[in-house]
Amino acid sequence: MRVTVAVKDMVKSDGLLLLVALIWGFAFVAQRSGMEVIGPFAFSGVRFALMSTGVAYTLQVVVQRKAHPAHASIILSMEALFAAIGGVMILHEPVTLRLVAGGALMFAGMTCSQMKPRKHAAQS
């Protein structure tokens, strides 16, 4: 019973960290769009007050207390990947070979860092 509670807590904290990475990643996309509408000074104030400090940073600090350190670092490093995906989806930026290769390398690196090493057979 105790193990399942710990696993549920870990999954919950990992999911919330993923949400933080999404917020931080899409904040860069929103910055470009928002500055065109209300101007850079006003947008920076709103973004800082609401999203950066109010939501993402607070959520990140609270969730990182309970999250596994390795999971937290991997999930939060996905911010750049989410920013690239958001740029393509929202800002209609072109999908280039460089963008796809960079995203694939980032994702592959994150995946490889979580793989368990193989145990080699004992040599005589």
Image: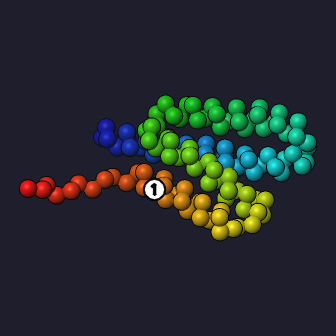
Residue, x 13% and y 55% (percent of image)? 122
The answer, for residue 23, to whether it is visible in the render is yes
- Seen as rendered, the residue at the extreme left is 124
Q: Residue at x 16, y 58 (%)?
A: 121
Badge 1 element: helix
Relative vertical location of residue 22 with respect to residue 46 in this rendering, above or below? below
Residue 3, compared with residue 116, is above or below; it is above
Residue 35's quadrant in the figure?
A: top right
Instruction: Look at 83% across and 51% down and name the residue there.
Output: 33
Q: Where on the picture, by quarter, is residue 84?
A: bottom right
The amino acid type found where label 1 is placed reads Thr
The residue carrying mark 1 is 111
Where residue 8 sits, quadrant-wise, is top left
Instruction: Return the residue nearer the eye: 2 or 99.
Output: 99
Q: Position of residue 57 (x, y in %)?
A: 64, 33
Which one is in front, 100 or 20? Answer: 100
